[in-house]
Amino acid sequence: MKPIFSPNHAFSFKEKIAKYLLEDGGVMNWSVRNKCILMLILGSSVHMIWIIWKVFVLLSPEVWPWVNLPLLKLQLEMNILILTVFIALIYPCSAWRKKAWVQQCLPYVSVGILVMSLCRDGYVIGVLSPATMITYMSLLTVGLVLFNRKIVYCALIPATLFLLVCGYLGLQGQISYGPLFNLHTLPYQNMFWVLTMMYFIVPILITCLILFEILLSQWRHREKLIQHLSQVDPLTNTLNRRSINNCLEKLERKPNESYALVLIDLDHFKRINDQYGHDKGDETLIQVSQALSQIIRDSDMLGRFGGEEFLLILNHSSLQQAQIIAERCRQAIQQLHLYSESGEIIPVTASFGIALSSPSLNSQQLLSRADKALYAAKGYGRNQVKCYQAELFTEPKPC
């Protein structure tokens, strides 16, 4: 398995991830100002839908018997007024975006006006009508996703009480239920009423479905990203130690599959950090991981096992094959071209320890054998490959 990313620099990877999570992550990560503008645009769209419907009714005398024309004209004026307010509020969102009080107050103002206007419209068409119920639920779910709960509940709790009281008083006959319609002349199966409900419901449902799809897509992508980040080393973009252990546990459950472990330790790495700085140390680790990833097969796995240690898991590999791959890796590391700030060549070498799997060994025992072989490679002078032979219990044998 090759590294998922091919970094040019370690920090570019971190910066891209941070930029995605904090800035470019879609609606969820928008600023409060942008979310307020979104709510104002949605509110304006709803009132435009209302205005279009009411103008249509006023221009259609055949439906006048089913509506309260004086109230409809009054509501049309209210919709135009509220639409103007919504559009006017977009300006301070942009012009005064850096003012602290704007950031604090605008969410309450925009959400509050939107909820109150929808409650008023919900009452005039009937609080138990399908359009009112769907609008209420959509507004609740979208609001809770986009804004802090405190902002949403400050508007929705009074709105819920208002709708409940209006519904109760309407059912008791103390106030008119759905005063916009002449309900005594408007049977439920009336096509005008049905089409009116569909006209209000469909745009709200489509808008909410689009928003939910955007949010769910972002959540899914973020989950995959977080899962990936938990599996890789952020500096070298190779598997981290946790992922390596998971791979070894999976291989341990398949005792019939042979594989080899190659433990790699960079020689005198502390000297590079101390003499040339940690930036050069990081650059060394990155170049080493890139060199190793270009040599191993697609079926193999590469991970950063420790500070300057890497581990290769060579699947379906014999000891001889593992030795050939390790030797190619050793030569590739030795041929790396690293230079200090003054142009001095920074020598880089590594020692290798190889151990071959066996049904009688668990992953930790195999790692212990690879570590012993690595220790022997260092003892023999570093910058070489050593293999652990099963018949030698105390000392690894040179390959």
Image (cartoon, rainbow, N blue to C red):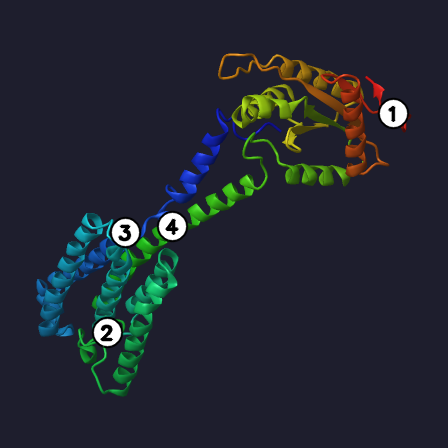
* Residue 155, percent from left and from top: 30, 68
- Label 4 or label 3, whichever lies nearer to me, is 3
Under mark 4, the amino acid is: Met
In the figure, residue 80 lies in which quadrant? bottom left
Relative to 115, say whether 365 is above or below.
above
Question: For the residues marked 1 and 2, what is the alpha-carbon distance in whole angstroms?
Answer: 86 Å
Residue under pointer 1: 395
Q: Quadrant of the C terminus?
A: top right
Q: Which mark is residue 28?
A: 4
Q: Choose mark 1 or mark 2, whichever is in front.
A: 1
* Distance from the alpha carbon under mark 3 to that under mark 2: 30 Å
Q: Where is mark 3, residue-wise?
A: 33
Nearest-to-viewer mark from 4 and 1: 1
Tell which tag, 3 or 2, sits nearer the viewer: 3
Of labels 1 and 3, earlier in sequence is: 3
How far apart in space, not on screen, are marks 4 and 1 (Cα)?
A: 58 Å
Decide which of tag 4 and tag 1 comes sooner along the chain.
Answer: 4
Image disc number at residue 123: 2
